[in-house]
Amino acid sequence: MEIELECKIDYLSLARELVKPVQDAGQAILDIYHQGASVQIKGDGSPVTKADLASEAILLPAISVAAPSIQIVSEENATSHGFAVTDRFFLVDPLDGTKEFIKSDNNGAFTVNIGLIEGGRPVMGIVYAPALDRLFFGAKDAGAFEMLGNVCRKIKVRKPPADGWTAVASVSHRDKATNDWLQARGICNTIAIGSSLKFCLIAAGEADAYPRYGPTMEWDTAAADAILRAAGGSVLTANGQVLGYGKSGYRNTSFFAFGGGSPASFQKEDTL
């Protein structure tokens, strides 16, 4: 399926075409996961494993075939981090949640992520958690889905229950600012999970909010952000603006993801 930059893209068809490569990458990750992964430390201090590289080796050629004219920015391809931002580009994280991947607790909270950005906004995303066998995808104007075997079910954000909101929070990066945000809003119910799955749980109606103060890169969030938006949610910066993509260094500021509740009721200048 050749896609020209000036042509309108069928985002959902593109997502469906890339599901199989994402599953293949997930299987390659699982093979290494079960063997026990050796870890190297990159120049920025973050960990990388053979699984990151094996996944990227599957994903990048597949994306290039599906959409040959669209630029790819990938976490493990350092050269791509210096690319000038274009109107359309992919953001790829071959293994999101590497710290969860190398833990011995076997909770499986790591994912494969492909996101497509257009005009600074995420318009298509695929997130696959191979150890949990949960695959999510979504596309602008088409909705969000979870794939269960060969069957897809449509997912959407929920209206928060009367007994209170549930928030998802990082396992490896939970901090005082996050705890203060939750406390200031009376949110007592939390789910601790790693990687981009936090967005996906909100998209699937299993949680209501995700505050993030710690550092993230755009390839960490783009795919799941697209899914959440397609499911009816939103992702806002501290000043209430929609989180954009193509920022300097592909680096995110603090952000707050919401499901079907009103973000306005949870934004207070003294804590944001």
Image: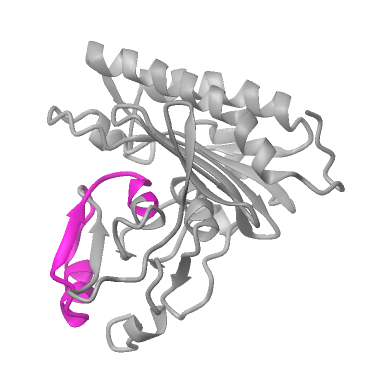
17 in relation to 158, above or below: above
Q: Is residue 220 visible?
A: yes
The image shows residue 244 at horizontal and vertical percentages of 57, 64
Q: Is residue 149 magenta?
A: no
Q: Is residue 192 magenta?
A: yes
- Viewer-side residue, 98 vs 158: 158
Residue 70 horizontal side relative to residue 124, left or right = right
Q: What residue do we see at 82% from left, 44% from top?
A: 5
143 in relation to 69, above or below: below
The boundaries of the magenta stretch are 172-200
Q: What residue do we see at 25% from left, 36% from top?
A: 99
The image shows residue 95 at horizontal and vertical percentages of 40, 32
- Quarter containing the N terminus: top right
200 in relation to 53, above or below: below
The image's colouring method is one colour
Q: Is residue 83 visible?
A: no
The image shows residue 164 at horizontal and vertical percentages of 20, 74
Residue 41 horizontal side relative to residue 55, left or right = left
Q: What residue do we see at 55% from left, 29% from top?
A: 19
The image shows residue 58 at horizontal and vertical percentages of 54, 19
- Quarter containing the C terminus: bottom left
106 in relation to 72, above or below: above
- Viewer-side residue, 224 vs 60: 224
- Viewer-side residue, 137 vs 216: 137
The mark total stands at 0
Residue 100: quarter of image: top left
